[in-house]
């Protein structure tokens, strides 16, 4: 996870996610750098729009909270499912998971 966090830190700082930059961040954090992992993360993130992935990931906790609420109130379950279908206009959970999978390699 530290490799992804370091990549997100670089992205947030508007720095290029390169092998050298990633190594520098990891070294500064006291992580023993694995060259293979660094190369894999940099290669995996080249084709990823991190802003889009973060935008989609922010919607995930809301989608996960809805089923928990439905279990707490079984009598209202049908109404909530209907509302979820009507309100669901963004990407599906599968699309979000696919985007995150591409982020994590």
Image: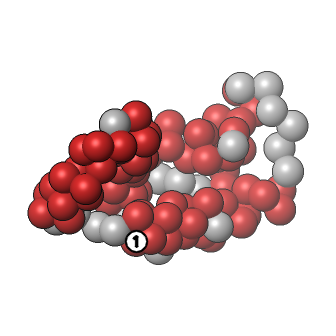
| Frontmost residue, 70 versus 101 | 70
Q: In which quarter of the image is residue 65?
A: top left
| Percent coordinates x, y for residue 4 in the rendering | 61, 47
The quarter of the image holding the C terminus is bottom right
Label 1 packing within 10 angstroms: few (<14), some (14-19), many (20+): few
Whether residue 12 is visible: no
Q: Which residue is drawn at 78% across and 58% down?
A: 37
Which residue is located at x 29 percent, y 67 percent?
Answer: 91
Q: Residue at x 66, y 56 (%)?
A: 19
Q: Where residue 76 sits in the image (x, y, percent)?
A: 25, 44
| Picture coordinates of residue 82, whole percent (x, y) | 18, 61
Quadrant for the N terminus in the image: top right
Residue labelled with disc 1: 95
User: Would residue 59 appear left or right of 72 to someone viewing this image?
Assistant: left
Q: Residue furthest left?
A: 86
> In front: 95, or 25?
95
> SS of the residue at dot 1?
helix
Q: Can residue 83 be seen in this view?
A: yes
In the image, 57 versus 18, the foreground residue is 57
Q: In the figure, residue 29 lies in which quadrant? A: top right
Q: What's the residue at 39%, 58% (across, down)?
A: 53
Q: Is residue 4 left or right of residue 23?
A: left
């Amino acid at each position: 996870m530290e490799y992804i966090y370091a990549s997100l830190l670089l992205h947030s700082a508007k720095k290029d996610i390169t092998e050298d930059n990633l190594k520098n961040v990891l070294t500064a954090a006291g992580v023993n750098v694995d060259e293979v992992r660094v190369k894999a993360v940099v290669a995996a993130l080249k084709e990823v729009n991190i802003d889009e992935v973060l935008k989609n990931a922010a919607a995930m906790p809301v989608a996960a909270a809805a089923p928990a609420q439905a279990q707490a109130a079984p009598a209202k379950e049908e109404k909530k499912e209907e509302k979820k279908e009507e309100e669901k206009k963004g990407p599906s959970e599968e699309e979000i998971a696919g985007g995150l999978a591409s982020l994590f390699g």
